[in-house]
């Protein structure tokens, strides 16, 4: 383990001068008084914090940091960090677990995929290839996405088939 990371007790680690608790709070001892870090307002839900590591500011995911310290395992590129209660703001170690990407995609099979039947694809092609009447514009791909409630890629694949 790194010399800048030390276990204080079963519930706390010292990480480059920051105190990381098992319940997910990160406290900075820099400055005149300890201050709890809340995270960026633009990440959901305040999931990242900036820590000064070796004199350089680094953006760190709180959940990954907590899991990595208390499990003594680093999440590899094939691992996905999940939350037991589904609340991504609860970064307590007891709420975190890792599954493989393969398991993750099995859970989400078919998620965000829109499959069209042959009748719908034929209708899409006719609509898109129809010549505009006087005073009308040709139907755009964006209009097709809105009409069929799908992504641009999905519309393009349907039109090519």
Image: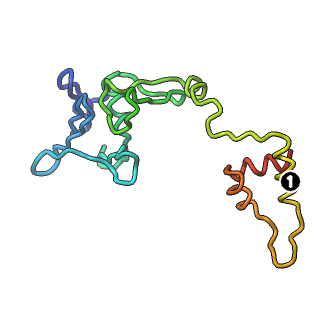
| Label 1 neighbour load within 10 Å: few <14, some 14-19, many 20+ | some
Which of the pair 151/55 is nearer the observer?
151
Q: Give the vertical position of 7 relative to 24 (above or below).
A: above
Give the percent coordinates (x, y) of residue 106: 60, 25
Q: Residue at x 35, y 34 (%)?
A: 65
Task: Kindly identify which residue carries mark 1.
Answer: 125
Q: Quadrant of the N terminus?
A: top left
Using the rendered view, name the quadrant where residue 64 is placed: top left
**Total number of numbered discs in the rendering:** 1
Which residue, as the protein is rendered here, is positioned at the far left?
A: 32
Using the rendered view, name the quadrant where residue 104 is placed: top right
Q: Residue at x 88, y 63 (%)?
A: 130
Using the rendered view, name the quadrant where residue 22 is placed: top left
Q: Residue at x 22, y 32 (%)?
A: 14
Which residue, as the protein is rendered here, is positioned at the far bottom?
A: 135
Q: Is residue 30 left or right of residue 152?
A: left
Q: Is residue 44 left or right of residue 121?
A: left
Give the percent coordinates (x, y) of residue 100: 53, 23
Q: Residue at x 25, y 38 (%)?
A: 16
Q: Quadrant of the C terminus?
A: top right
Q: Helix, strand or loop at disc 1?
A: helix
Which of the pair 85/13 is nearer the observer?
85
Give the percent coordinates (x, y) of residue 56: 33, 49
Which of the pair 7/3 is nearer the observer?
7
Which of the pair 47/134 is nearer the observer?
134
Q: How is the image coloured?
A: rainbow
Give the percent coordinates (x, y) of residue 150: 68, 49
């Amino acid at each position: 383990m790194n010399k800048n990371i030390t276990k204080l007790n079963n519930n706390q680690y010292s990480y480059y001068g920051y105190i990381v608790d098992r319940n997910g709070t990160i406290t900075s001892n820099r400055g005149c008084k300890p201050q709890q870090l809340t995270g960026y307002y633009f990440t959901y839900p305040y999931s990242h914090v900036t820590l000064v590591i070796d004199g350089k500011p680094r953006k760190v995911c709180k959940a990954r940091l907590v899991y990595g310290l208390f499990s003594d395992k680093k999440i590899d590129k094939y691992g996905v960090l999940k939350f037991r209660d589904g609340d991504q703001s609860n970064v307590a170690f007891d709420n975190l677990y890792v599954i493989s990407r393969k398991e993750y995609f099995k859970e989400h099979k078919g998620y965000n995929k829109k499959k069209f039947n042959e009748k719908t694809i034929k209708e899409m092609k006719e609509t898109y290839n129809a010549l505009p009447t006087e005073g009308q514009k040709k139907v755009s791909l964006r209009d097709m996405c809105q009409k069929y409630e799908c992504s641009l890629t999905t519309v393009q694949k349907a039109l090519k088939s």
